[in-house]
Amino acid sequence: MNVLVLNCGSSSAKFAVIDPQTRRELVSGIAQRLGSAEASLDWKHNGTRQTRALPGAGHDAALRAVVEMLREMGLVSSLVGIGHRVVHGGEQFSGSMLITSEVVAKVEACIPLGPLHNPPNLLGIRLAQELFPGLPQVGVFDTAFHQTMPPVAYTYPVPYEWLERYGVRRYGFHGTSHRFVARQALALAGLPADDHAVVTAHLGNGSSCTAVLNGRSVDTTMGLTPLEGVMMGTRSGSVDPAIIAHVARQGNGTEQDALDALNKKSGLLGVSGLSNDLRTIEQAAGEGHARAQLALDIFCYVLAKHLAGLVVPLGRLDALVFTGGIGENSTLVRRRVIEHLGFLGLTIDPDANDTHGRHHQGRITTSTRPQALVVPTNEELMIAMDTVEIVQGAAVSSEH
Ligand code: ADP
């Protein structure tokens, strides 16, 4: 009982065929640089990586190539559904949904909120409907997990009409990852499903942190867009919005240019002047590069401030979960953050941290309440699990 998971971006399409019951990934890959002469299809199957040039291919040609490949592998007939990652579900979706024409219309209505992501997500849905007629398709939304936030967490202190007229509020992102790792953490830390206070830190190129109370998101750091919150690879995270007008007035550019710079030229890249990649920053800081060191210091400091802030809606902390490329791999960031948060009762276990908690059920602290854990995320698996659940539910309800 396999699921094809699709994540269509503006110039790429990631895919994976997963058996949610065994949690096995049968094949995964990415078609990237779509629309250019360098377009290619890279995939991993039976432990080997392969690549194929698809010069000039757009999403359409790339997905057709993927389907052809899955057919040759004998996987198409095993599919029970297709799970799509959809970035912005606005206030329309509080959970994953079977895709119908009504759902497509609602995703279209969310385009103003996710102008860069929702159009390619919709394109992926349309192409998959065409390529797999009759196969159920499920939308899994980055924003859905955060729809449980109370008004005090999602309402910005701005003119209230902005919320009513323009949908200006905190939506939050990375919901699929936060939901997955919070669930895993309960099992690892032996926390009860109906009584836990967990903070999850998804730290990748884009980063966000979430407060999870008894399985529900009660606050998160990203906002209307993924720009808000902690410092990221190229995004500034939260800054004074007046910076935008000030820089536009002082420099040559427009306010849009300044906003673009907050998204694409800030964060680790902006401060260090070197790279958005934390590995490069850590190495340069180790070699004495002052601005790389400053970027690293700010990254850990700002992250710790946000994590501490997320304990407020929880009232206590049982577990702090690190995930994403940085959260799963950077011993340095985890150690520095836990040191900042020592006042909460977290104490690092250096050996466990060095081995990413692998031999300690994920735990990297000597303290157990609260404890910090490393939990590898798996958004594709979560999407596949949701898809099977919804497809099976739909089959059962259509039998009655
Ligand atoms: P994305 O948000 O694009 O999915 P990832 O979750 O893959 O990003 O995270 C990418 C980040 O993880 C990069 O900043 C990278 O430097 C960092 N990273 C990956 N491996 C390591 C490592 N061993 N040590 C420190 N940082 C790492």
Image: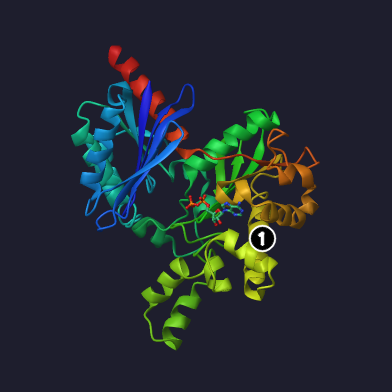
Q: Give amino acid for label 1.
A: Cys
Label 1 element class: helix
Q: Nearer the viewer, residue 48 or 146?
A: 48
Q: In this view, does 300 lie above or below 198?
A: below
Q: Nearer the viewer, residue 34 or 84?
A: 34
Colouring style = rainbow
Name the spot of residue 181 as percent of width and height, x first. Answer: 57, 38
Q: Which of 172 and 266 is in front in this view?
A: 266
Is 298 displayed left or right of 28 in the figure?
right
Quadrant location of the N terminus in the rendered image: top left
Asked which quadrant contains residue 19, the reply is: top left
Q: Is mark 1 within 8 Å of ligand 1?
A: no
Residue lying at 44% horizontally and 60% vertically, measured from the top left: 160
Residue lying at 52% horizontally and 45% vertically, measured from the top left: 149
Name the spot of residue 125 as percent of width and height, x first. Answer: 26, 40
Is 359 displayed left or right of 94 in the figure?
right
Asked which quadrant contains residue 369, the reply is: top right
Q: In this view, does 95 lie above or below 220?
A: above
**Number of residue marks:** 1
Is residue 375 in view from this perspective? yes
Is residue 94 in view from this perspective? no
Name the spot of residue 263 as percent of width and height, x first. Answer: 45, 66
Name the spot of residue 79 as percent of width and height, x first. Answer: 32, 24
User: Label 1 crowding class (10 Å Cα cut-off): few <14, some 14-19, many 20+?
Assistant: many
Quadrant location of the C terminus in the rendered image: top left
The residue that label 1 is drawn on is 300
Residue lying at 75% horizontally and 54% vertically, measured from the top left: 341
